[in-house]
Image: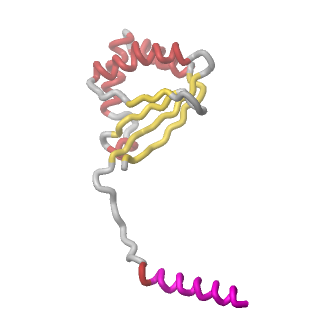
Amino acid sequence: MKIYKTTIAILVLLFVSSFGFSQEMKAEKYDNPEWVSMSYIKFKPMKKDPAMSIIENYFVKADQDAGIEAPTVFHFVTGDYDMLVIWEMSEGVETLNYKMTPDDAKWMKSMAKIAGSEEKAMAKMDEFFSYVDSWDNTLARKE
């Protein structure tokens, strides 16, 4: 019975003290948040090398030609995915309101120039995606 009374006393003390330490809840925005889009990519067996060839010979060159900052890329040694690609979202979450961002349009124009035509650029992208087993996207905010 003594343990029961002690436990009740501690719970009451914690409950009452929480009112004294609580702060008023108010809306608050982040100051200049930096948002990124992250893609986790897993390639089909034996298809990472041909996919990387397309990245190096087309995608990277399209970034350079369009004057767009290349994404940050990590290659996993363990885990379910082969690669993590992180794109900076220069307009933050406002980027999500575009069907195609201005940078995407510039990149596609450069991709068509490098591939030889819009059709060849789309065929090269289709080839790349044929090597992908799974592709998961997420958004993150830098702290």
Q: Camera-side residue: 21 or 120? A: 21
Instruction: Provide the major secondary structure of the magenta segment.
Output: helix
Q: Position of residue 27 (x, y in %)?
A: 36, 67
Q: Residue at x 36, y 19 (%)?
A: 60
**Is 37 placed left or right of 10 in the picture?**
left
Residue 2 lies in quadrant: bottom right
Q: In the image, which residues are magenta?
A: 1-19
**Is 14 placed left or right of 65 in the picture?**
right
Quarter occupied by the N terminus? bottom right
**Is 7 placed left or right of 112 in the picture?**
right
Q: Position of residue 5 (x, y in %)?
A: 66, 90
Q: Residue at x 43, y 12 (%)?
A: 120
Q: Position of residue 72 (x, y in %)?
A: 39, 31
Residue 74 lies in quadrant: top left
Q: How many marks?
A: 0
Q: Is residue 109 above or below residue 5?
A: above
Is residue 8 part of the magenta span, yes or no?
yes
Q: Residue at x 52, y 29 (%)?
A: 76
Q: Camera-side residue: 122 or 17? A: 17
Is residue 38 part of the magenta span, yes or no?
no
Residue 101 lies in quadrant: top left
Q: Camera-side residue: 28 or 96? A: 28
